[in-house]
Image (tube, helix red, strand yellow):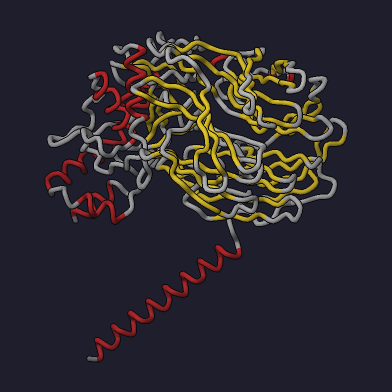
Amino acid sequence: MRKRKRLQMLLLLTAFLSSLLGIGVWLFQLLNPMTATTLPLHPEADLYLLTNKGSYALDLEGDQFAVLEKSDRPVAEFVYHYYPRASFDDRYLVLSKGWEANYANYPTGVVSLDFETGKVHTTKTEHYAHTSAGHSKDYFYTLATTTGGTNITQFNAQGEELQTKVLPKLFVDRFFCDSSGHFYIGNVEDQEGIFTSTLLKVDEKDLTILEEIPLQTSDDIHLRFSESVVLDETLYTPLNSIRDNATKEIAAENQLLIKNLETGEEHYATLPQYFPNQVIPKGDYLFIEHGVTETGQVGFTVFNRVTEDSYFVDVATLLNQELDPNTSHLQRFNLDQQGRLFFNVNQEIVCMDVESGNLLSTFSLEEAEKVFYLWPTS
Amino acid sequence: MTISIVLGLLACQPMMTLADESTDYTNEQLAEIAKIETQLQETVKMYEETANSVPVQSDPKDFYRAAKGSWSWRDGLICITTKGKGNQVVNTWHAAIVAPQQIQSVAEAPGENQQVRFTAGWWEDPAPYTVYQVAVNSTSVQEDWNAGQWAGRQIGKPYNTKFWDSRRTDRFYCSQLVWAAYYYTAGVDLNKNDNDLPWGFAIHPGEFVTNSNTTIVYRSR
């Protein structure tokens, strides 16, 4: 009898200690999160640099970067390099964080950063950018393609999840739009192996498809667009390559489709390099990255939307150093109001004057430091 | 005892799923799995040494005309990384296949509790990991496209934790998806039988980089 009582006491004590330990771990995690809850804001900062190693407030005086503030805690453990982030009202940055796979597993969610108050808010959600991400003028979207279609989830600037819906289509990469009330998304129709590209107009209220706009007229070929950017109801989408639907062979392209979505008028502008991929709009410019492994050249096109003039920036020449096309990917383009273009290549942040194409400055990152975003303050 | 062996073998998998899956194994089968496990470290070492010792070849089917030895987005190319969960048995490393449905994307079975999905963008696994791309030798451009498209059509299907049950097409693990894409569309069997058991076979991604039916067209280091 006494033995049984002792056993019961032991069990109770174990349960009590386990609970205490659990509360302790929970409290420790609450008080010491792995990721930052605030940004290191500084009134003199020209640029905020967010990486997997922390956040920096940088000052660019003349041709020198100076670190004004630095936080060693990153805003997220991992942000997939390929999927777009969203900025709203020159104040909020929203991005999807995390990745779930056996080969790389990081906590998932949607992070909203407020560059006015410095607050970092993380929303835990299973609807992270699983297949892709994009944004309209007012909302951030994550995509997950499944057998039944694409699951699209809408978040506001504060990172709050608003609605989610399955659209019965297979979608291509990204979408972008400056309109309120609707957005456009690229889509590839797969009909018994014949692929055609279309653009879908989606209502932001309830995520229903309003219209399907064809982007090609022939079934003999598949026009392979990379990203779609819609500005003032004009679509800009780089034509990366053309696939022959009979032979499946692919031919390189260097065109930019410009289509007025209200009148249907369209034309192509020729770009100075082949395999245009990611397109980042800023002001009057589009910055278009090209497939470095296909072209063998690490560079990007600066396309002026007003004049439709463009020029190619060979980054190896700009930096006066050899760059390996297999590892030197160009990322995170952003432009400030003084015409200073910031971007990331390897372990460098590069600042160049967009008008003259001259190098202004570089900032070196630590080894294995990955850039999540570059946020100019002006 | 039997459950604990499987849990030990497949340590990264959640216990509930494993318990469900492992109840199908007999003691004899578990002993055979354990034998594979003891050999796996050596097998994986052999894969890496072999794959790193052969020269990288040009891809004769590459219409991109990419520089020799460059990463390529040609449909149907098999992508492999040595990065994976270190304590798994057969699905250490990772494999995927370039799918034509989405530009610059692979179709992949990323892991437990994850569905087959498209993932866009280049692969960058820094040292000590190595990324490879291999082309299947005997197939045409059309057949490679077919394989990539077939894999892309499996999106949404769940992960297969029964690694020796590779013929099924209702769920996939990473290298099974790649193997199945070529097996079911072009009749090309990329199984080298390195991890076979009398009652089933499992495909390790390393079998694609050390395979007489494939050519390494890209190696990251």
Q: Residue at x 79, y 35 (%)?
A: A336
Q: Is residue B61 above or below residue A84?
A: above
Q: Residue at x 62, y 27 (%)?
A: A261
Outermost residue to the right:
A62
> Is A250 displayed left or right of A117 in the figure?
left
Quadrant in the picture for the N terminus of chain B: bottom left
Residue A296 percent location from the top left of the image: 58, 14
User: Taking A20 as reference, is A67 left or right?
Assistant: right
Please tell me which residue lies in front, A58 or A149.
Answer: A149
A38 or A240: nearer the eye? Answer: A240
Q: Is residue A23 above or below residue A264?
A: below
In the rendered structure, the answer to whether residue A92 lies left or right of residue A125 reads right
Q: In this orientation, which residue lies closer to the viewer: A199 or B61? A: A199
Name the residue rendered at 81%, 27% in the picture. A360
Expressed as whole percent of the image width and height from the top left, the position of residue A132 reads 51, 37
One can see residue A82 in this view: no
**Residue at the extreme front of the image, as rendered:** A263
